[in-house]
Image (cartoon, rainbow, N blue to C red):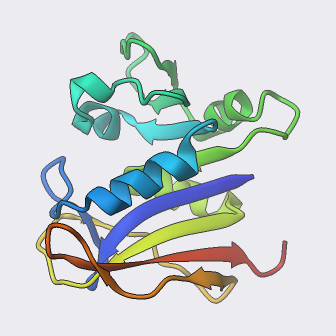
C-alpha cells in the first residue's frame, strides 16, 4: 500500500518556510498512529524541517529523497529517486506499507502511484508557498470525520480517500 498523508488549509496550503502554518497536536497524534510501523518517504527539505529530536521518526523506516549523492541523514536511508524509495519501502515484494510525508514535489510524483490519501482539512486561510497536490475524480472518500476544534483553537477534520479503480 502506498499512501500520502498531509494537512491542508482551505486554500490547499501545506507548508510555509519549512514549517506547518498551524499547530494541531491532534493531527500530529493521528500522523504518528497512521505511519508507525510503516516506511515514511520524504524529500530532503521535509527531513530537515523535522525537529532534530524526532529524526529519524521513531517506529518507522525513514527514507529521504535527495539529488545530493553524499547527503547524510543519520538514522534514515538516502536514495536518489522515488522508484528506489518505494523499492526499499516494500522490501522488494510489494508487501510493505509506505507513507509519503512530503514535500510538494514528492507528493506530486507519488500521487499517480498511490492507493490511499489521509488528509487533514484545516478550517482556515493560511499563507504559504507549499501547496497540496490536486486530487482528481479518480479518488473517492472512504471516511470523513466531523469538524472538531483542536486544543489550540484550530478547527479541523480528517478524510481518507481511496483510488476508485484499485
Note whether 67 is above or below 112 in the view shown: above
Give the quarter of the image for residue 90.
top right
Q: Is residue 132 left or right of residue 17?
A: right
Q: Nearer the viewer, residue 122 or 66?
A: 122
The image position of residue 61, as x and y in percent, is: 57, 27
The image position of residue 136, as x and y in percent, is: 58, 84
Note whether 92 is above or below 86 in the view shown: above
User: What is the tally of numbered marks visible in this picture?
Assistant: 0
Extreme residue in the right direction: 93
Q: Is residue 100 visible?
A: no
The image position of residue 110, as x and y in percent, is: 59, 55
Give the quarter of the image for residue 24.
bottom left
Q: Residue at x 47, y 19 (%)?
A: 76
Q: Residue at x 32, y 79 (%)?
A: 156
Q: Residue at x 46, y 29 (%)?
A: 64
The image position of residue 77, as x and y in percent, is: 52, 19
- Quadrant containing the C terminus is bottom right
Note whether 55 is above or below 72 in the view shown: below
Give the quarter of the image for residue 89.
top right
Q: Nearer the viewer, residue 124 or 67?
A: 124
Q: Is residue 154 left or right of residue 140?
A: left
Q: Residue at x 62, y 33 (%)?
A: 85
Q: Is residue 1 visible?
A: yes
Note whether 23 is above or below 67 in the view shown: below
Q: Nearer the viewer, residue 141 or 28?
A: 28
Amino acid at each position: 500500500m502506498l499512501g500520502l498523508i498531509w494537512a491542508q488549509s482551505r486554500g490547499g496550503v501545506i507548508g510555509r518556510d519549512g514549517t506547518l502554518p498551524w499547530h494541531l497536536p491532534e493531527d500530529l497524534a493521528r500522523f504518528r498512529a497512521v505511519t508507525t510501523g510503516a516506511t515514511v518517504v520524504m524529500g530532503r527539505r521535509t527531513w530537515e524541517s523535522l525537529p532534530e529530536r524526532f529524526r529519524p521518526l521513531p517506529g518507522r523506516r525513514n527514507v529521504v529523497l535527495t539529488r545530493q549523492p553524499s547527503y547524510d541523514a543519520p538514522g534514515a536511508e538516502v536514495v536518489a529517486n522515488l522508484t528506489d524509495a518505494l523499492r526499499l519501502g516494500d522490501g522488494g515484494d510489494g508487501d510493505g506499507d509506505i507513507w509519503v510525508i512530503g514535500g510538494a514535489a514528492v507528493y506530486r510524483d507519488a500521487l499517480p502511484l498511490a492507493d490511499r490519501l489521509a488528509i487533514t482539512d484545516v478550517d482556515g486561510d493560511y499563507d504559504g508557498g507549499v501547496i497540496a497536490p490536486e486530487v482528481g475524480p479518480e479518488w473517492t472518500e472512504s471516511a470523513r470525520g466531523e469538524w472538531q476544534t483542536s486544543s489550540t483553537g484550530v478547527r479541523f477534520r480528517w478524510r481518507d480517500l481511496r483510488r476508485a479503480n484499485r
